[in-house]
Amino acid sequence: MATPTTGPNERRYWQNWDNGDAAARINQYWESSEEGWRQDLASDLVAHFRASEPLLEVGSGSGLIYKTLRDYGLVTNETYRGGDISERMLDIARRRAPDTRFDKLDIFALPFEDRSQPNVICIHVLQHLPSFEAAVAELVRVAGKKLYSASWFVEEEQDQTVFTDPAKDWNDQCFYNNYYSLPRFLKFLETHWGNAIQTVELTRFGGVNFGVTISFAEHVTRTNPLIAAPSATLPGAEKKTANVRRGYLRGETASLRPIESKDLSQLVEWRNQPETWAQFFNTSPLTEDGQAEWFKNLRSDKRRQLFVVTTPEGKAVGTVGLDTIDQLNQSAEIGNILIGDSSYRGKGLAQAAVSLLVDYCFERLNLRRLYLHVFEENAAARKVYEKCGFTVEGILREAKYADGKFKNVVIMSRLRAG
Ligand SMILES: CC(C)(COP(=O)(O)OP(=O)(O)OC[C@H]1O[C@@H](n2cnc3c(N)ncnc32)[C@H](O)[C@@H]1OP(=O)(O)O)[C@@H](O)C(=O)NCCC(=O)NCCS
């Protein structure tokens, strides 16, 4: 077995997967027990990448993730390229998908130019490394547009557990199993590439798994600070921007962040203001108890998302959201548009927030059609939607009863260009 020696992580025990029949046994274990998890992962990835875009998988194991992504229509044998350090894993992957390209790759010394791979994914590799920094630096270096990495992250400040597991069933192999600190991971990104990163989004799925999707700005050169210039000032360190924020979609006039339970009472207050309530289709006022239940359902419903609209300074002023995200038909209904703090109305915040939401839907969720329902008489909201590129599709005459009369409801939509 060729033992990789590159980088500061020589005790990388997963290379022992090439001993005996360890690779075959692990593959068997993955096949028999992790199908549901891979499906969950695939739907997360479908939300972030377009089907026609090339995707490099670093640490492709025995090709099972490729197979799931192919079944989901996210990749074809032409758009996907995978690689792993283990020859035996590669053998299994190549047998599983003979017409697909799987290469030998060392995550600490990837054989690619800076930013030469538009999209890179790295699934469940980091937690088996003694430290994540050198590997992440390589992934960031080669990823041009987006990097998605799923690992066992914890929300605490400290890495939680570091242990080697003799895993006797797999020929006495040793494996690192590290639960890395998510704040530490995000800080690492911000310190080195704060000016190159546009957004960082987190997804949680299944137990200890976190998916971290990083979108990069076009113009900034990136190198691996840990290999290229270990003692020099690290790229981005001199300009620590606040770009890395949990789940943030950032704009100049407004930003969006996912709603948290701490926002619920504010939401109830905003939505129950009489002039606001009049513009929504719910007939009874919201209650805090009801909101708690609603929030629980929201979190488990992948078809809905709600964002808090904030000012550039981070003050929460309203909401925008998505209902009925339909991946098959690539459409979603936009709703919950509200600038709740009326002193912030008329300043372009709703327009900025809806524009961010539209970009998010087209660029990240890979949706094609967005639509919404609005009372015909709601001139301010209609103006916002028109300015965001929505056009009227039709009028539902006297479709809703409110304030003692039947009112017309307008359906507006916007399609992704091209
Ligand atoms: C609709 C709403 C979200 C707009 O928020 P906002 O931040 O004030 O919106 P913006 O500042 O981005 O844009 C509002 C636009 O509507 C215009 N507008 C405001 N009142 C208007 C009126 N009565 N008639 C016509 N246009 C009006 C503004 O002039 C502005 O256009 P401009 O940029 O060309 O000047 C806000 O008024 C609100 O929360 N209303 C209550 C909830 C609601 O109606 N939600 C929509 C449900 S479908």
Image (tube, rainbow, N blue to C red):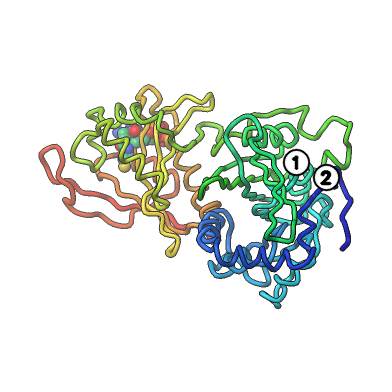
Residue named by callout 1: 131
Residue named by callout 2: 9
Secondary element at image label 2: loop
The type of residue carrying mark 1 is Ser
Cβ at disc 2 under 8 Å from ligand 1: no
The type of residue carrying mark 2 is Asn
**Which of the marked residues, 2 or 1, is nearer the chain's N terminus?**
2
**Distance from the alpha carbon under mark 2 to that under mark 1:** 8 Å
Report which quarter residue 21 is drawn in.
bottom right
Report which quarter residue 384 is drawn in.
top left
Work out whether 41 lies above or below 349.
below
Quadrant (top left/top right/bottom left/bottom right) for the C terminus: bottom right
Residue at image x 74%, y 70%?
101
Ligand 1 positioned in quadrant: top left
Q: Is residue 413 visible?
A: no
Work out whether 265 lies above or below 212.
above
Cβ at disc 1 under 8 Å from ligand 1: no
Q: Is residue 382 visible?
A: yes
Residue at image x 40%, y 53%?
303
The location of residue 143, given as percent across then percent down, is 73, 51
Residue at image x 69%, y 40%?
162
Circles 2 and 1, Cβ within 8 Å, touching? The answer is yes
Secondary element at image label 1: loop
Task: Give the residue at the far left of this rendering.
Answer: 404
Horizontally, residue 386 falls left or right of residue 361, namely left
In the rendered structure, find residue 282 and report the number of the disc placed on it: none
From the viewer's side, name the closer residue of 59 and 387: 59
Task: Give the residue at the far top of this rendering.
Answer: 343
